[in-house]
Image: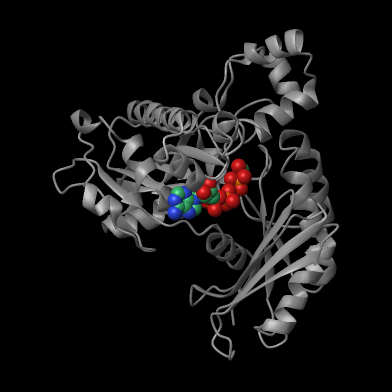
Amino acid sequence: MSIVLVVNSGSSSLKYQLIDVEESETLASGLVERIGRGVGHARHRHEGPENDSLGSTWDAAVEVPDHEAAFAVMLEAFAAHGPSLEAHPPIAVGHRVVQGGARFFEPTVITPLVKINIDELSALAPLHNPANLEGIEAAQRAFPDVPHVAVFDTAFHQTMPPAAYTYAIDRELAAKHRIRRYGFHGTSHRFVSRAAAAFLERPVEELRMIVLHLGNGASACAIAEGRSIETSMGMTPLEGLVMGTRSGDIDPAVLLHLERRAGLDADGLDRLLNSQSGILGLSGHADMRDLVAARDAGDEAAALALDVYAHRVRSYVGAYAAQLGRVDAIVFTAGVGENSPEVRALTLAGLEGFGVELDAARNRERSGEARRISTDASTTAVLVVPTNEELEIARQTLELVGA
Ligand SMILES: Nc1ncnc2c1ncn2[C@@H]1O[C@H](COP(=O)(O)OP(=O)(O)O)[C@@H](O)[C@H]1O
Ligand SMILES: CC(=O)OP(=O)(O)O
Ligand SMILES: [Mg+2]
């Protein structure tokens, strides 16, 4: 058996999947959300082969004051709704860790020293690393006898050249505080670039592509010969594209102005740019489905938010085309990229002169599979490729600890 439990702990959520890696099969998946915020919500789905309620989804309101409680809810869900963890014991637990700094290039077995390092790196990802660590602690208590492996969002971007990751500020200050661009969503960019190459039936080493991971968090990545050469998130997951609640790129002088004129301190600015900006700040909607519906109902703020969102993505497509020199494929992935024909069409509008031509009917088709949405004449292939960060984490975990 090659069963791996994958844990993705966010600041207020715990997502998990039990995966049979050799079969690339998800046996169960679920999430516990609103951790530490009053009554939480749990969802568990048993996909495995030996349950009467096969394929059914269990939803419940639960008390989850912290990640340890969320873990207990997850274990109860497995016990009550299957598959049984006794019958399908994970041989390892793989954890998504967002910030690995310049220290972690590879999936890493979690030792006490690795935990100290992840904790130290919290300064460079205050929203993500503390939650990742809480998830690791809870999981280690629940599964003390199996190896736990950290798979870092930053690892795939370690191949970026210094010209791409260096900020033009005082170099000694930057070195002292480890200020540079790290990039995130690397596990997804890696998985999707390989899946796109497989779809095109070409070795990834021969391809140059731009992957657009558009979810709640969003980032673009320029990938040459299978390696990340540039990505839009920076020292933290705040830089780059417009996101659900994050501003993405902004003139840093705006922060100084707000501090001086609006009395915002560091915490206030953090909240503003990470949690109250993006499409939420522009329109009142953080969810892309709601934003598109509001625009369709004639809401002007929603229309502008969508235009700003697409304009920013298009700017990155142009910039990365210049960095790559040639673009064989543009690949959309994650919640928005996989599901929103409106956003895909807006984003690539007007690029026909560069050999990027969407096929309107293909773009509207719904499917959970990798597919081409450009015309046959388009010199750059435009693809939709579903991401699967959990499967990639499970594969990397198994590769490290062996079967
Ligand atoms: N059918 C859809 N049309 C447009 N947007 C969608 C659709 N389904 C999901 N999304 C959007 O995907 C986003 C969530 O993406 P996801 O990759 O799941 O994010 P995360 O992993 O960061 O939580 C939300 O903004 C949601 O509105
Ligand atoms: C790194 C990051 O932004 O992750 P997410 O999209 O899950 O928030
Ligand atoms: Mg995500």
- 317 vs 387, left or right, is left
Question: Which is nearer the eye, 372 or 175?
Answer: 372
Residue drawn at 24 percent across, 43 percent down: 358
In this view, 119 is above or below 260: below
Q: Is residue 351 visible?
A: yes
State the image coordinates of residue 362 (x, y, percent, origin top left). 24, 53
Q: Residue furthest front?
A: 297
Question: Which is nearer the eye, 96 or 150?
Answer: 96
Residue drawn at 57 percent across, 37 percent down: 183
In this view, 50 is above or below 288: below
Quadrant showing the C terminus: bottom right
Residue drawn at 60 percent across, 34 percent down: 182
Name the image quarter holding residue 395: bottom right
State the image coordinates of residue 104 (x, y, percent, origin top left). 66, 45
Quadrant showing the N terminus: bottom right
State the image coordinates of residue 260 (x, y, percent, origin top left). 75, 8
In this view, 284 is above or below 5: above
